[in-house]
Image (cartoon, helix red, strand yellow):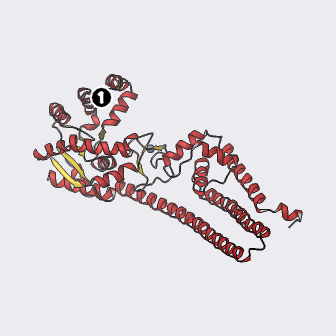
Amino acid sequence: MADPTEEQLDPADVYARELTNFAEALHVLHVDRGSPSYRAVSAAAETAGRVSLSSSAISEAFSGKRLPSLDFTLELVRQLAGPDQEVREDWRERWKRVKLCQRQSVARRRQSKPQHETGHSTQRGPLDSGRAALSAVRLEAERIIQAAQAEAETIIESARIRADEMTASATQMLLDATERGTIPVAERLRLREHTRIALAGPPGSGKGTQSPFLSKLLEVPFIHLGELYRSNIAGRTPVGKVVYGYMNRGELVPDEVMLEMLADRLRAPDTQHGFILDGLPRNLNQAIAVDDLLSATSEGIEAVLNFDISRDESFRRVIGRRVCKNDSSHLAHVTYATPQKYGRCDVCGGPLYTREDDSRDVVAKRWDVWKSMTEPVVQKYGAEGRLVTVSGIGPVSSVTERALTALNAYFG
Ligand SMILES: [Zn+2]
């Protein structure tokens, strides 16, 4: 035991050395990738919505004070080096090596403790053997728990990778199918001179997901109120400046201003064969005003397409939702449409984020607003015989097909 080479190979020292090397390698990776700020890395990971990488935890991982979890390590590496599988596997192996050293170090520490105790109390034989047996059982239990945890981490990680691959290929198939126009009823609808519809439904009912597909298949543009606000403000249009004024003062934008903006948009030539209004009208007053506006310039909304889902399903969907910073029509979902690259838009590669609107308490408020303000609008269109309701449950392509079939039947 007193042999100096044995001393050097003390598991605690080996672990300390391995941990330092590991932390240094992480740090080198960070420097190699241009040393992005911890805050930027943390924000990108938050967008990916998998593992939280706080600035202080990143700093700790680089300092080598302790071994970060496998999840943390892989997410940090992903943020620094991208989703390359080989790099990932390499870091998983590195992490396992350090973890093994850590376990050996912990095991040695536990083993050496009872030995000291027995050394001091050789007289109490029966008690000692009882204590030794107890600590042996405890050690064995610890070992089993640690082994199970390591095994579980590996299983979860490979399940995630598999799920990501499946979702990515399914999304691609869906886009390909849409491209080829495999939904035959769409062809009949395209023959109509114009199609003017508005989409309705509670938060998370799929309006935003469906609108680009419906727009593509029906060959009419979709108009989203939030997008209209943003583009008018960004383009510094006259109405955009007015809207900006209200927002800057923290005031609600009046319906008249919203309608002026919408009227502007409807004068654009791409709406001559119709349009899909997404998220409009939101309350009875707006519905009446929009009808007035449209009947003055065209022939009004022909049908409101209402996607029906339960309150539970609404919550499940909205809270997992992510939106692309470049284009709010690029959507992803942590469970239903996991992006191919974590935190990155599948369409354009832009960063994904969670809208403030999609947080749990905001969703509860939005559901109440939908029930009290917007559902009466749906009922109004229903009473006027201009309502088409379909179930919003199921895969995106099934809902699209269901919606087109229902519209086709409605228009006859
Ligand atoms: Zn995008």
Q: Is residue 153 above or below residue 190?
A: below
Q: Quadrant of ligand 1?
A: top left
Q: Is residue 153 left or right of residue 191?
A: right
Residue found farthest to the left: 384
| Residue at figure coordinates x 13%, y 47% from the top left | 382
Asked whether residue 196 appears in the rendered view, the answer is no
- Looking at the image, residue 384 sits to the left or right of residue 367; the answer is left
Residue 168, position as x, y percentages in the image: 45, 57
Quarter occupied by residue 398? bottom left
Name the quarter where the N terminus is drawn.
bottom right
Classify 10 Å Cα crowding around label 1: few (below 14), some (14-19), many (20 and above): few
Position of residue 404 relative to residue 250, above or below, is: below
Residue 365 is at least partly visible in this image: yes
> Looking at the picture, does residue 77 appear above or below residue 264?
below
Count of all numbered marks drawn on residues in the image: 1
Question: In the orientation shown, which residue stands out farthest toward the right?
Answer: 3
Measuring from the top left, give residue 128's x and y in whole percent.
71, 73
* Quarter of the view holding residue 368: top left
Q: Residue at x 39, y 41 (%)?
A: 328
Where disc 1 sits, the SS reads loop
Nearest to the observer: residue 178 or residue 3? 3
Residue 277, given in percent of the width and then of the height, sits at 26, 41
Residue labelled with disc 1: 252
The amino acid type found where label 1 is placed reads Leu
Q: Is mark 1 within 8 Å of ligand 1?
A: no
